[in-house]
Image (cartoon, helix red, strand yellow):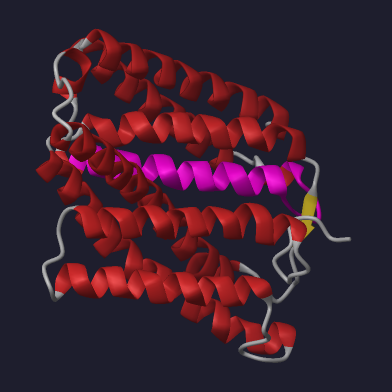
Amino acid sequence: MISPEASTLITLIFYALASIVGLAGMIMRSPLWRRLGCWLAMAGFICQTLMLATGFHKALPGGLSLGAYLQMLAWFVLLCGLAVWFKLRQETALLFAAPLGLMLFAMSAPYLSALVQVPPSLKAPFYALHIGALFLSLGLLALAFAAGALFLFLEGRIKSKQSMKGFWQDMPALSMLDKINAFTTLTAFPLYTLGIVAGLIWAKPVFGATVTGDPKEVISIVVWLLFAVLFHNRLANGWKGRKPARLAVFIFLLCLFSIIVVNTFMDTHHAFIRR
């Protein structure tokens, strides 16, 4: 059985190499190095997948650790980065996903033993519908955030007539960044909706009510409403460019607040650390 520490170290090395090589490829404008960074990110993803499949969580008796939670989120981020790479033939999404996965793994290391007890009623169906759908939607939303933030930054440089030579010439076109933002947000919203609905259904037998007023529930519903606005306007009103980019960035930052602040510091059913 592979220990959480060994699994973390091996995968961390792959994601670190992918981040360094990919960044070097972007700075040096080397297609070979960028491609190598993508393959290293894929190798790290495969390594993490094998670690999960061969018993990583069996070494965590009694529950799921905060560290494992962050690592699972990293896995979904890399999965979405790979999907965009294969679907849209864009290396940039995966080259952004690798450093994000690296950061999540680095953050996870001190918390591998901080167990979050899982109630017996929250078993396979719950994780498949609630946790799985939400994690996948967050992975997609992370890429929507990266594409939206880069879109806003590059658009600002173009409008202010700053130089777009050298390194900046290799950045994706604004139309491609908008396409990545649209693909990820339109895919993520139905998954996020599925995750929220599954959570509300399971809340009744677990917590005694469908809606309990828990801080995590409140902020998740706010995120869903904003997400619904973005989804509707993208699909029905043909939103493009700056508006959906800004809203995608804001929604992702709100999700980060929910994960980091609400789950860690507030009194909630979803707390990482029970006081």
The reply, left or right, for residue 130 in relation to residue 230 is: right
Q: Can residue 136 be seen at all in this image of the molecule?
A: no
The reply, left or right, for residue 117 in relation to residue 131 is: right
Q: Report which quarter residue 158 is drawn in.
A: top left
The spot of residue 265 in percent (x, y) is: 76, 57
Q: Can residue 141 be seen at all in this image of the molecule?
A: yes
Q: Is 82 above or below relative to 193?
A: above
Q: Residue at x 70, y 32 (%)?
A: 109
Main secondary structure type of the part rendered in magenta:
helix
Pick the quarter of the image with the N terminus: top right
Q: Residue at x 17, y 13 (%)?
A: 166
The spot of residue 238 in percent (x, y) is: 11, 67
Q: Report which quarter residue 154 is drawn in.
A: top left
Q: Residue at x 56, y 83 (%)?
A: 200
The reply, left or right, for residue 104 in relation to residue 163 is: right
Total number of numbered discs in the rendering: 0
Q: Nearer the viewer, residue 179 or 71?
A: 179
Q: Residue at x 19, y 39 (%)?
A: 155
Query: Quick check: is 72 in the magenta stretch?
Result: yes
Q: Is 10 above or below relative to 172?
A: above
The spot of residue 136 in percent (x, y) is: 42, 56
Q: Residue furthest front?
A: 160
The spot of residue 241 in percent (x, y) is: 17, 53
Query: Quick check: is 256 in the magenta stretch?
Result: no
> Start and end of the magenta stretch?
59-86
